Image: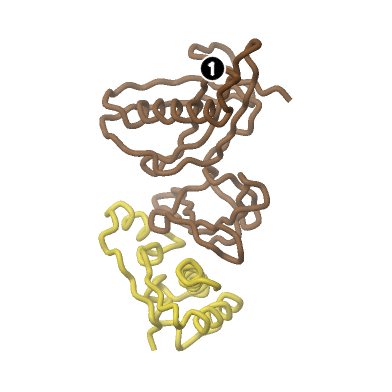
Amino acid sequence: MIKSLVIIGLALSASLNVLAQTSGSASALAIQPMAVDCAQAASMSQELEAIIAEPSKRNATWDPTLSWVGGINSAQQRLASAKTVLWNIRTQCRGF
Amino acid sequence: MPRILILLLLVAGTAQADCYYRSSNISRLRAPIERIADLERTVMPVGQDQNRCRVTFRALIQNQWHTVEGESTGPITTSLDQICGQALNLGRTQILDRVAGTDITAAQEMICTDQPIPRTRDLVAVGDTVRESEVQPHPVHRRSFGYRGSECKWFVESRPESGRVDMNQGIICRGSKEQDWRVVDKW
């Protein structure tokens, strides 16, 4: 299941996209705005914290989403993508 | 401790460790000040009946931080907040003239100060204490947010490395001191 994340704001500057696409740490999608369904924030936060604690462990639920956000699904990329999504949750949803 | 601020337009000789060159390139493009951070003010009496306020701060213009100074003098009957407000406005006007004015000129000056000068840091680590203007603002997440009772902000960090650009994102949260922010995460 793809989690309820929506990437918006496709009109970012070209330079930003180029910068991000050549990045070793963050993909273009990872720095774009991300809308979060705060109704699922509690469960998503819990799952993401588990991934961050153990990024080398595969997660069938989250891997497609994290791969979509951060590109190649290595442990390092999974960690970065999980942090991106988690901090988007903390930014947009109160109390997380 | 007395604060010293010396502006030298023409400087010969070796720069001291607490001195730095400030360069400015003035372009035709007009741009607003997006954010002001790390504001410090120094008030000193001038003669019997006047006060002088000198402010230094960092201004974010077109995604670049600039160090700015402004100074204003007023009678002791005027509140310090008002005098310092004038100094802040002068500094804002001057930096906008320099950075976002209508003429194209280049200038360089040396500033010596005993105040800590915030500069954008190449790399920060989780746990570091930084000034807000020592990190680059995030291009997307510009507004602060609340996390565990603290005000927090996103930042980005990029460095060119042999033909590619490494980019990190991170979070800073305001510390116990007004000017201090703590790096709480970076990835």
Q: Position of residue B74 (x, y in %)?
A: 54, 19
Q: Nearer the viewer, residue B26 or B53?
A: B53
- Residue B32 vertical placement versus B101 (above, below): below
Q: Which residue is mark 1?
A: B7
Display colour for chain A: yellow
Q: Position of residue A26 (x, y in %)?
A: 43, 63
Q: Secondary structure at mark 1?
A: strand
**Looking at the image, which residue is at 44% across and 82% down?**
A39
Supply the letter of whichever chain is brown.
B
Q: Position of residue B185 (x, y in %)?
A: 58, 62
**Looking at the image, which residue is at 41% across and 70% down?**
A70
Q: Quadrant of residue A22?
A: bottom left
**Could you tell me how many numbered marks the image carries?**
1
Q: Amino acid at mark 1?
A: Leu
Left or right, residue B61 beside residue B125: left
Left or right, residue B176 beside residue A8: right
- Residue B70 vertical placement versus B163 (above, below): above
Disc 1: CA contacts within 10 A as few (<14), some (14-19) or many (>=20): few
**Looking at the image, which residue is at 45% across and 69% down?**
A92
Q: Position of residue A38 (x, y in %)?
A: 44, 78
For the N terminus of chain B, the image quarter is top right
Left or right, residue B173 beside residue B159: right
